Every structure is written in C-alpha cells, then in structure tokens.
Image (tube, rainbow, N blue to C red):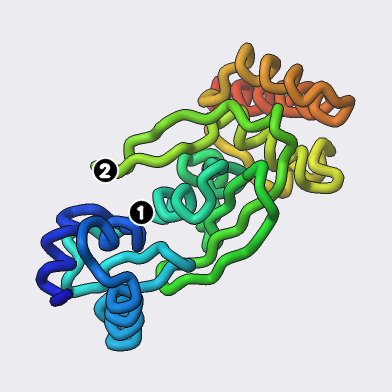
Amino acid sequence: MEFDRLLELIGAEPVFETAILLAGNVNPDNIHVQLSRWTKSGRIYQLRRGLYAIAPPYQKIKPHPFLIANRLQRASYVSTQSALAFYGMIPDTVHVTGSVTTGRPERIQTPLGIFEFRHIKPNLLQGYRMTDLSGQQALVATPEKALLDLIYLHPGGDTLEYLRELRLQNLDRLNPDNLRKQSDIFDTPKSRKAVEVITSLTQIETQEYEDI
C-alpha cells in the first residue's frame, strides 16, 4: 500500500485502527510492515497496538486528547482534573489526560500526550455525555461526576483542605440536584460528606460574588 492510499482511506479521521486497512484482498503482513515503516519515518504515530494517528504535515485534523483517550480504552470517559479544567472549574493546566474506566488502570505515554486511566466499579460508569470538541466528539464526565470521581479516587478527597487545594472556581456550573443524584450512586459516607463540603464552598463563592 502506498502512503497516498492510506491518506485516502483515512480521510479526515483524527485516529485510525489497523482494521480499516485489512478489509478486502490484502496481505496483513504487508500492512503491518508498512505501518512499521511509516511509524519509523515519522509519517504516522502509533498510539498503542492497532491504533494510529497521521502525523504533521499530512494530518488533516489534529486529534483532541479527549478523543484519543476514549479510543485508547473503550469502556472509559474523560473525568477528574482533565474534565474540571475543560469546564473552567480549576485554574491549573492539566498535562496528563485523566479518564476513568471499568478496565485495568494504566498510564500510556504517546507522541500526542500522556493518558492515565483509573479503575472504578461498573455501576459508577455513568454521569458522562458525548461532548463536542470543535468538530470532534468524546465522552466526558459532567462537572458533577468529574468532581465526585476525583474525590472518590483521591485519599482524603472529601476534606475541606483538599477541596481548597484544588482552587475550585465557577461552582455555579454545578447542578445541585445532579450532584446529589451522583452522590447517591456512589452511596458512601465519603461522597455524602463531599456534597456537604462542596455546597458550603458554593455558598461562600456566591456570597463573595454578591459582595463585589
């Protein structure tokens, strides 16, 4: 297969899987050899086994980190600090794209960034939505679920001290009803305490805004 033929097959897809090249009357060994050569020459990036992205200057669309995260682990969605930063709820720049998954936890370093997956129970794999990312789409936790996922996964995450360390902002973007509903799904003393602390922080932020 010629490289131009690969670009024709991929089109504007940000990432692609080996399977798309194996349809029809092709020799799988030849395809794998070509993928290896294109990776070594810098024409494509290997994100993990069987998953690739076209490299500049050949790529038509730069893959969004959230989309890559979704494709690296199928049973996952972007959450914790990455989602909170996306919603403007923490001021920090997040350099590792964080997701939660019912699969195995892992940290994957790729040419397009570092991706971390934290394990949660199957019944907690909810509270996310398909989100538009300037033409691309990925599964991202709601603000309420992203915060509760972070609290759930972090030792001492329900304490006032830890939540203050996060420097939470724009707390009016949290829906109180959704926050309580998600907390009920976790059904732990930690999640219930966290809701109380977050509610108090929201009231403080609201009062400070009104005093300006």
Image coords of residue 21 (percent x, y) = 26, 62
Image coords of residue 56 (percent x, y) = 22, 73
- In front here: 112 or 54? 54
Element assignment for label 1:
loop
Tell whether 46 sits left or right of 6. Answer: right
Q: Return the residue found at the far top.
A: 177
Image coords of residue 112 (percent x, y) = 41, 68
Residue wearing tag 1: 64
Location of the N terminus by quadrant is bottom left
Is residue 35 depicted above or below 91 in this figure? below
- In front here: 199 or 143? 143
- In front here: 197 or 137? 137
Marks 2/1: CA–CA distance: 9 Å
Is residue 21 depicted above or below 151 in this figure? below
Residue wearing tag 2: 134
Q: Residue at x 26, y 43 (%)?
A: 134
Image coords of residue 81 (percent x, y) = 59, 48
Tell whether 128 sits left or right of 3. Answer: right
- Label 1 near label 2: C-beta < 8 Å? yes
- In front here: 181 or 17? 17
